[in-house]
Image (cartoon, rainbow, N blue to C red):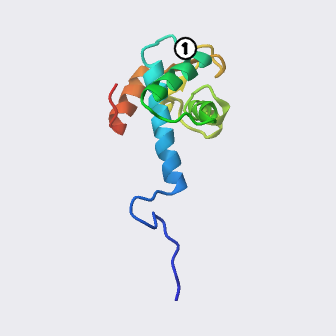
Amino acid sequence: MNKQPSNGPSRPGEESMSERRMQADRLYLFDLVRVLRPHVAGLRRWSVMNKIRSYREAAGFLIHHRMEDTVERLYRNHCADAEIFKKRGAAPDTALFFSPQGKPGGIWAVHSDRADAWLKREGFEL
């Protein structure tokens, strides 16, 4: 009897690790957009992390000990000024985020028009 590997959950309601990570990443991206959207000039990384932590605590989410690592990874993956974004060969006009100082260090900012389109596409509202 040849058993094929399952591509999906083995039981109803069970998600794979990659599906859970993708959903968590999507929510962290939403948090990044929500925090940065009102601040045209951007915010310091420290302020972004504090605001995300506050939103998540108020919503009753557990704060994962690697939250800041995850948020930074997502920011860099979607930041036009980050090396990882450039190495992927992604078109600069697809980046959600940028650094007003030209390097993804201290100040983080969001491209409002792209963020609005992303929010709409993902079914989120601010």
The percent coordinates of residue 98 (x first, y second) are: 55, 22
- Would residue 28 appear left or right of 119 to someone viewing this image? right
Image: 83 above or below 113 = below
Does residue 111 appear in the picture of this structure?
Answer: no
Instruction: Please name whichever residue, 37 or 55, is drawn nearer the observer in this view of the structure.
Output: 55
Q: Is residue 102 above or below residue 75?
A: above
Residue at figure coordinates x 45%, y 36% from the top left:
27
Would residue 45 appear left or right of 113 to someone viewing this image? right
Tell me the quarter of the image containing the C terminus: top left
Whether residue 41 is visible here, answered yes or no, is yes
Residue 17 lies in quadrant: bottom right
The residue identified by callout 1 is 43
Q: Position of residue 94 (x, y in %)?
A: 48, 33
Q: Quadrant of residue 116?
A: top left
Q: SS class of the residue under badge 1?
A: strand
Q: Residues within 10 Å of mark 1 (few under 14, many from 20)?
A: many
Residue visible at 42% across and 21% down in the picture: 112
Residue 38 position within the rendered picture, expressed as x and y whole percent measured from the top left? 42, 14
